[in-house]
Image (spheres, helix red, strand yellow):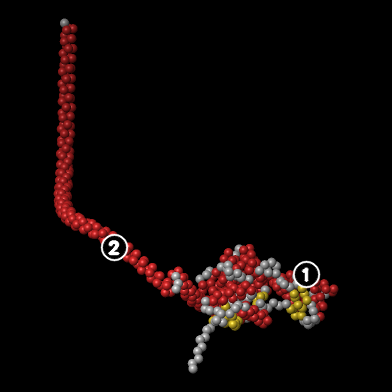
């Protein structure tokens, strides 16, 4: 019983504990649920408020977007309306233009139809005229053929009548006419040739005189007064013995050191130096003057003095060449060529100094080149070096022009200058620069005081010139004037007519060029004079 009671008590206790636990759990659950409900309500309230705010923002943005969309749609609609109106206007203009073009095309078609009708009518008329012209042409040809035959018959009759009257055939008459016409035309051509030749000569002479006169006026040159010194003065005749020395040892030493021949003769107070080389002659002259002034004359002193004189001469040659190059205005010459040019200081030609003459030729050639339009530098260089071969004529065989050309090629002178140097004595194949050098050489040589020539040689040259002119038939008298630069020839008018006078002048010129030697140029003038004389009674 007690077990049942205990069990019941335990059962009820458990039930009571379960009831109490359930009540407590329910109470706790209710409290938790109420808190969750409160939290959910507060969160829902917060969410609702934020949703309301977002709703307001979204609505404002939607309204703004709708407004913008509405404005854009309205603008697009307005643009489309404007575009539609413009297209309608353009389509209307095109329709009007198409209508206008159709109207013009219709008018052209009508005009072409009218022209076609006119052309067809003209073509019909032309065909008719062509038929008429063809008929007329055949008739005209028949008429011309008949007329030609009649003219031929009349011509033959007239020719036979003319031949019977003239007493000669047609061929003979034609030949006579041709001969007469040939003679007349030949005379006329000769006269025209003579007139043109005189005109060209006058113009050329006038131009040449102007150019040469300008060149000569611009030239300022000194008269030649230099001459090669060959005699050394002595203070007394006793000095001759000292120069000879014991058994001639001093004179042999001098001749051996200088390469000259020392001539000691009966000439009072003077010693003569003989040598074909002007440089060695100058060196010997300076050495002798130094020895005479010093008074100490023996082989050792002679060798020392000669070496000193050689150095002085070399320095003088170099300075002379440099001065000549500076005075003439020529550039680009090598030192060897300048030294070779300076050797011309001791070279003479026709009594004149060759270096001074070369400088004058260079200056005149430059002036002539400036007047004629040629290269001034080339002409100046060719004028300065045209006689450079004369510095070596005693050492090298050949003419000074050939030697000068070889030296120019050796020392690198420009080809136009070299050609002018080689050809300045050969006018037939000379270049324009060579011709300028020839003219400048003649001008420089012909001026007063440039050259000294003996009276005998001058007279012989004039006589030879007149003799050449008198050797031709028909020459009555001749006179050499202008110092042999011009010859005037009087011819007999009965033997030499106006046509033969130019030919006679050319023949005399060719003979002068082939037989005579002369400086510069010679002008040949043939004069024919006719006189008509009548007597009044």
Which percent across, then down, holds residue 263?
A: 78, 76
Residue occupying the point 56% across, 74% down: 506
Residue occupying the point 44% across, 73% down: 167
Which percent across, then down, holds residue 343?
A: 67, 71
Residue occupying the point 40% across, 72% down: 161
Q: Which residue is mark 1?
A: 256
The image quarter in which residue 292 lies: bottom right
Name the outermost residue toward the right.
247
The image quarter in which residue 122 lies: bottom left
The image quarter in which residue 58 lies: top left
Q: Secondary structure at mark 1?
A: helix
Q: Is residue 245 left or right of residue 499?
A: right
Q: Is residue 409 above or below residue 200?
A: above
Q: Residues within 10 Å of mark 2 (few under 14, many from 20)?
A: few
Q: Residues within 10 Å of mark 1 (few under 14, many from 20)?
A: few
Number of the label disc, if any, that sits on residue 140: 2
Q: Quadrant of the N terminus?
A: top left
Towards the viewer: 270 or 153:
153
Q: Is residue 93 left or right of residue 288?
A: left
Towards the viewer: 493 or 527:
493
Q: Secondary structure at mark 2?
A: helix
């Amino acid at each position: 019983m007690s077990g049942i009671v205990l069990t019941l008590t335990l059962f009820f206790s458990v039930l009571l504990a379960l009831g109490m636990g359930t009540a407590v759990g329910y109470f706790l659950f209710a409290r938790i649920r109420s808190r969750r409900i409160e939290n959910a309500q507060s969160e829902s309230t917060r969410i609702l408020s934020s949703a309301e705010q977002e709703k307001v923002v979204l609505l404002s943005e939607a309204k703004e977007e709708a407004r913008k969309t509405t404005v854009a749609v309205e603008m697009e609609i307005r643009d489309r309306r404007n575009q539609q109106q413009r297209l309608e206007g353009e389509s209307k203009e095109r329709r009007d233009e198409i209508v206008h073009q159709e109207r013009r095309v219709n008018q052209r078609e009508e005009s072409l139809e009218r022209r076609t009708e006119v052309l067809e009518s003209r073509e019909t008329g032309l065909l008719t005229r062509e038929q008429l012209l063809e008929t007329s042409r055949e008739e005209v040809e028949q008429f011309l053929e008949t007329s030609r035959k009649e003219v031929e018959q009349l011509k033959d009759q007239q020719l036979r009548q003319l031949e019977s009257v003239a007493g000669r055939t047609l061929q003979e008459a034609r030949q006579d006419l041709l001969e007469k016409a040939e003679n007349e035309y030949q005379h006329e051509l000769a006269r025209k040739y003579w007139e043109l030749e005189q005109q060209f000569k006058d113009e050329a002479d006038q131009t040449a005189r102007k150019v040469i006169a300008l060149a000569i006026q611009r030239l300022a040159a000194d008269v030649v007064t230099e001459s090669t010194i060959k005699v050394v003065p002595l203070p007394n005749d006793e000095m001759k013995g000292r120069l000879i020395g014991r058994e001639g040892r001093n004179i042999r030493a001098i001749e051996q050191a200088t390469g000259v021949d020392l001539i000691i003769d009966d000439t009072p107070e003077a010693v003569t130096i003989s040598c074909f080389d002007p440089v060695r002659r100058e060196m010997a002259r300076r050495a002798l003057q130094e020895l005479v002034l010093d008074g100490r004359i023996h082989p050792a002193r002679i060798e020392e003095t000669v070496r000193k004189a050689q150095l002085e001469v070399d320095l003088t040659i170099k300075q002379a060449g440099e001065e000549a190059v500076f005075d003439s205005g020529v550039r680009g010459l090598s030192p060897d060529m300048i030294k070779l040019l300076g050797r011309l200081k001791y070279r003479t030609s026709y009594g004149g100094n060759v270096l001074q003459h070369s400088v004058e030729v260079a200056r005149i050639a430059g002036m002539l080149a400036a007047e004629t339009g040629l290269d001034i530098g080339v002409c100046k260089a060719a004028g300065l070096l045209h006689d450079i071969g004369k510095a070596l004529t005693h050492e090298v065989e050949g003419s000074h022009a050939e030697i000068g050309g070889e030296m120019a090629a050796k020392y690198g002178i420009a080809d136009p200058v070299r050609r002018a140097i080689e050809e300045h004595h050969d006018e037939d194949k000379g270049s324009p620069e060579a011709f300028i050098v020839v003219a400048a050489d003649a001008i420089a040589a012909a001026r007063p005081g440039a050259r000294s020539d003996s009276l005998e040689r001058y007279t012989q040259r004039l006589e030879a010139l007149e003799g050449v002119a008198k050797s031709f038939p028909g020459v009555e008298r001749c006179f050499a004037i202008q110092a042999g630069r011009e010859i005037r020839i009087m011819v007999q008018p009965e033997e030499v007519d106006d046509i033969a006078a130019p030919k006679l002048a050319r023949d005399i010129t060719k003979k002068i060029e082939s037989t005579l030697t002369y400086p510069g140029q010679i002008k040949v003038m043939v004069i024919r004079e006719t006189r008509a004389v009548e007597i009044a009674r």
